[in-house]
Image (cartoon, rainbow, N blue to C red):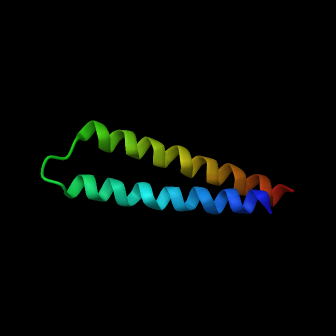
Amino acid sequence: MAVESRIAELEKRHELLERAIEDELLSPGSDDLQVTQLKRQKLRIKEEIERLSAEAKAA
């Protein structure tokens, strides 16, 4: 159960980062560095979700 709740938490953070990226890209003075950092965070979270999901399936 702990793994499932962690995955749910990560999915929520992933969605929030997606919205933050969209908001940043839509702003007139969007900061490319900020967008890149947000995308990297989002990717790390996605990788963690995939890793945890794979471990949960194997168990």
20 on left or right of 6: left
- In this view of the protein, which residue sits in the foreground, 30 or 49? 30
Q: Is the residue 11 above or below the residue 42 in the image?
A: below
24 on left or right of 45: left
- Please identify the quarter of the rendering in which residue 40 is found: top left
Q: Residue furthest left?
A: 28
Residue 39 in the image: state x and y as whole percent. Answer: 40, 46
Q: Residue furthest top?
A: 33
Q: Quadrant of the C terminus?
A: bottom right
Residue 22 in the image: state x and y as whole percent. Answer: 30, 58
50 on left or right of 38: right
Residue 5 in the image: state x and y as whole percent. Answer: 70, 62
Q: Is the residue 33 above or below the residue 46 in the image?
A: above
Question: How many numbered tags mark residues here?
Answer: 0
59 on left or right of 27: right
Q: Residue at x 53, y 43 (%)?
A: 44
- Please identify the quarter of the rendering in which residue 16 is found: bottom left
Q: Residue at x 36, y 60 (%)?
A: 19
Q: Residue at x 27, y 58 (%)?
A: 23
- In this view of the protein, which residue sits in the foreground, 21 or 47? 21
Q: Quadrant of the N terminus?
A: bottom right
Q: Is the residue 51 above or below the residue 2 in the image?
A: above
